[in-house]
Image (cartoon, rainbow, N blue to C red):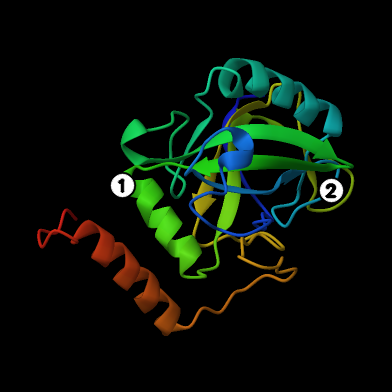
Amino acid sequence: MSKQLIVEYMPFTPIGSLTESSGAAYGIPGGFVVQGVLQRAGEKNQNGRVYPRSILQRECMRYQKEFIDQHRALGELDHPESSVVNLNNVSHNVLKIWWDGDDLKGAVQILETPSGNILKALFKAGITLGISSRGLGSVKELRNEGTVEVQEDFELICWDFVSNPSTHGAFMRRTHMNESVNKTIKPSKYDKVHDIITSILCEDGKCRI
């Protein structure tokens, strides 16, 4: 079986206040940190995929050693069609991951980069966001109609923040988890996002779009 780019969306609800001092607990005074669910094991998602816990645990151990421990667990704002993290679009760094039952949780630092500043502004404005895993691997169809299982060759690349998640509950909110799929977005919400992004990119009077 050949490897393919596998993209998944999971609920990620910020816990605690979203302030410039939220990173103090992680040794980052003045840092902006959010934490919540990154991924879920053993449960069929809306894309029809199931991630065995043993595979996710193995990848988490590798990711911890090769990326988090080396302070380079970077992710991007929105998903690229690539298996490589593009430094020009980096918005955050994963500080810590841990298991809570079948939920994989994490603490994520929002960086002072152009994409990170956009992400931070969206959080502060109360915009609904999602977080999504990106990896390489193959899948195997199970007997259950429409269900496939991620196989042993799966390799986790990173987690990205996204604006348009398509999986059940795949949203990130300031205060609570949205347990339904939001398929209708009012034009005013897009206008608000556009205004925030434009204000950041054009804050010096010269737009860099």
Q: Is the C terminus in the top left, top right, bottom left or bottom right quadrant? A: bottom left
Q: Nearer the viewer, mark 2 or mark 1?
A: 1
Question: Which quadrant of the view contains residue 105?
Answer: top right
Reply above or below: 187 against 124: below
Would you call the spot at circle 2 few (<14 residues within 10 Å), some (14-19), or many (20 or more)?
few
Q: Position of residue 29 (x, y in %)?
A: 50, 39
Query: Residue at horizontal 34%, vertical 42%?
Result: 113
Q: Is the N terminus in the top left, top right, bottom left or bottom right quadrant? A: top right
Query: As shown in the figure, which amino acid type bears the numbered disc 1?
Result: Pro
Of the residues under marks 2 and 1, which one precedes in the sequence? 2
Query: Residue at horizontal 89%, vertical 42%?
Result: 101
- Nearer to me, 159 or 25: 25
Reply above or below: 17 against 61: below
Q: Position of residue 56 (x, y in %)?
A: 76, 30
The count of marks equals 2
> Could you tell me which secondary element the residue under label 2 belongs to?
loop
Distance between the Cα atoms at labels 2 and 1?
Answer: 35 Å
Is residue 13 shown to the viewer in this render? Answer: yes
> Could you tell me which secondary element the residue under label 1 belongs to?
helix
Q: Is residue 167 left or right of residue 75?
A: right
CB atoms of marks 2 and 1 within 8 Å = no
Q: Which residue is mark 1?
A: 114
Q: Which residue is mark 2?
A: 43
Reply above or below: 28 against 182: above
- Nearer to me, 44 or 20: 20
Query: As shown in the figure, which amino acid type bears the numbered disc 2?
Result: Glu
